[in-house]
Image: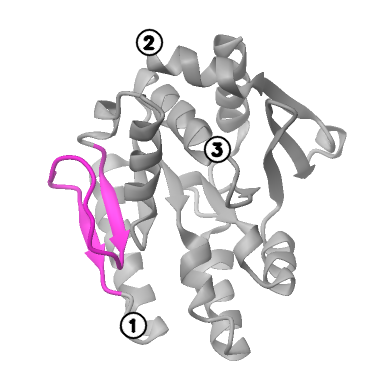
C-alpha cells in the first residue's frame, strides 16, 4: 500500500511540466509531514535535484513531527535549503544553503530571494522546489491588502513559467483568511487538497490544467503508511 501511494504521488510530481507549480492545501491537524517525507524520499531515490524553501522554520516543525512519529529523519540531512526568516536550521550546512531576511521591506527581500534562486539554478540546473511555511509569511501581510497583492504577484505569480524549476507549495489554508486562499487558488493552475478522513490520508485534485483530473484521489491508510515509514 505504501509503495502504491508513493508511486502515485511520484508519478503526479513527474507529470508537472517545467515551470508548473501546484498548491497542496491542508489544515493544521492533517499529517502533512507524511506526504512531505514521501516526496523527499522519492526525489532522493530518483536523483532529481531539489531544494526546500523553508519559511519561518516550518521545515524544522516537519522534522519534529516525523521524529515524534518514530520516523528516521536522517533523510533530511544534506538537503539544500533556502531559508526565509526563522532561526532553526535542519540538517547539515552545505554550500547550497541560502538565507533571506524577510524583516526587510517585501521588494527588498523578494529581490534577495530571486538572487538566491539564481545561484541555486547555476549549481543545480533544472530542479524541483518544495516550499513549506508560506502560510506563515502570508499571515504577516494579510492586514495590508496592497502589500499582500504585491507579494502574490511578485512572489508567486512570477514563478509560473520559469522553465528552470517546478514545484510543490504546502499551504495551511486553515490559518488564512478565505479570500487569501481564493486568491492563491486563482493564481496557481493546479490545486490539491490533503486531508485525513476516516483513517485514510487522501490527496485530491481540486484544480488542474487537465480537466479530466478533477476530483481524482490518491489514498492510503495513514497508520499503515506511518508504520511502514518507521521501518
Q: Do the residues bearing badges 2 and 3 touch, measured as CB atoms within 8 Å?
A: no
Q: Is residue 99 magenta?
A: yes
Q: Which residues are magenta?
A: 79-101
Sooner in the amino-acid sequence: mark 1 or mark 2: 1
Q: Nearer the viewer, mark 3 or mark 1?
A: 3
Question: Can you give x and y, in whole percent of width and height, for residue 179 in the image?
Answer: 74, 73
Sooner in the amino-acid sequence: mark 3 or mark 1: 3
Alpha carbons under labels 1 and 2: distance apart: 45 Å
Q: Is residue 215 magenta?
A: no
- The answer to whether any part of residue 164 appears in the image is no
Q: Residue at x 39, y 16 (%)?
A: 230
Q: Nearer the viewer, mark 1 or mark 2?
A: 2
| Residue labelled with disc 1 | 108
Residue 31 image label: 3
Q: Residue at x 37, y 10 (%)?
A: 231
Residue 231 image label: 2
Quadrant that contains the N terminus: top right
Question: Can you give x and y, in whole percent of width and height, for residue 14 in the image?
Answer: 56, 28
Q: Residue at x 57, y 32 (%)?
A: 13
Tell me: residue 133, above or below residue 182: above
Q: Residue at x 69, y 26 (%)?
A: 199
Question: Can you give x and y, in whole percent of width and height, for residue 48 in the image?
Answer: 38, 28
Amino acid at each position: 500500500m505504501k509503495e502504491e501511494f508513493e508511486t502515485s504521488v511520484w508519478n503526479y510530481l513527474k507529470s508537472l511540466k517545467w515551470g508548473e507549480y501546484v498548491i497542496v492545501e491542508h489544515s493544521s491537524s492533517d499529517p502533512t509531514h507524511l506526504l512531505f517525507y514521501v516526496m523527499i524520499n522519492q526525489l532522493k531515490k530518483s536523483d532529481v535535484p531539489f531544494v526546500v524553501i523553508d519559511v519561518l522554520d516550518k521545515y524544522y516543525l516537519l522534522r519534529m513531527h516525523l521524529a515524534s512519529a518514530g520516523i528516521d529523519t536522517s533523510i533530511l540531512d544534506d538537503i539544500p535549503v533556502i531559508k526565509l526568516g526563522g532561526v532553526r536550521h535542519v540538517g547539515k550546512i552545505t554550500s547550497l544553503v541560502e538565507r533571506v531576511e524577510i524583516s526587510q521591506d517585501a521588494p527588498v527581500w523578494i529581490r534577495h530571494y530571486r538572487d538566491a534562486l539564481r545561484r541555486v539554478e547555476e549549481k543545480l540546473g533544472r530542479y524541483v522546489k518544495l516550499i513549506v511555511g508560506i502560510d506563515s509569511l502570508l499571515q504577516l501581510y494579510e492586514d495590508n491588502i496592497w502589500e499582500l497583492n504585491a507579494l502574490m504577484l511578485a512572489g508567486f505569480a512570477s514563478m509560473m513559467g520559469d522553465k528552470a524549476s517546478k514545484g510543490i507549495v504546502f499551504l495551511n489554508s486553515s490559518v488564512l483568511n478565505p479570500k487569501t486562499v481564493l486568491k492563491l487558488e486563482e493564481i496557481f493552475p493546479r490545486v490539491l487538497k490533503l486531508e485525513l478522513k476516516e483513517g485514510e490520508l487522501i490527496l485530491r485534485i481540486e484544480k488542474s490544467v487537465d480537466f479530466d483530473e478533477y476530483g481524482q484521489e490518491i489514498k492510503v491508510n495513514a497508520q499503515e503508511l506511518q508504520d511502514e515509514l518507521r521501518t
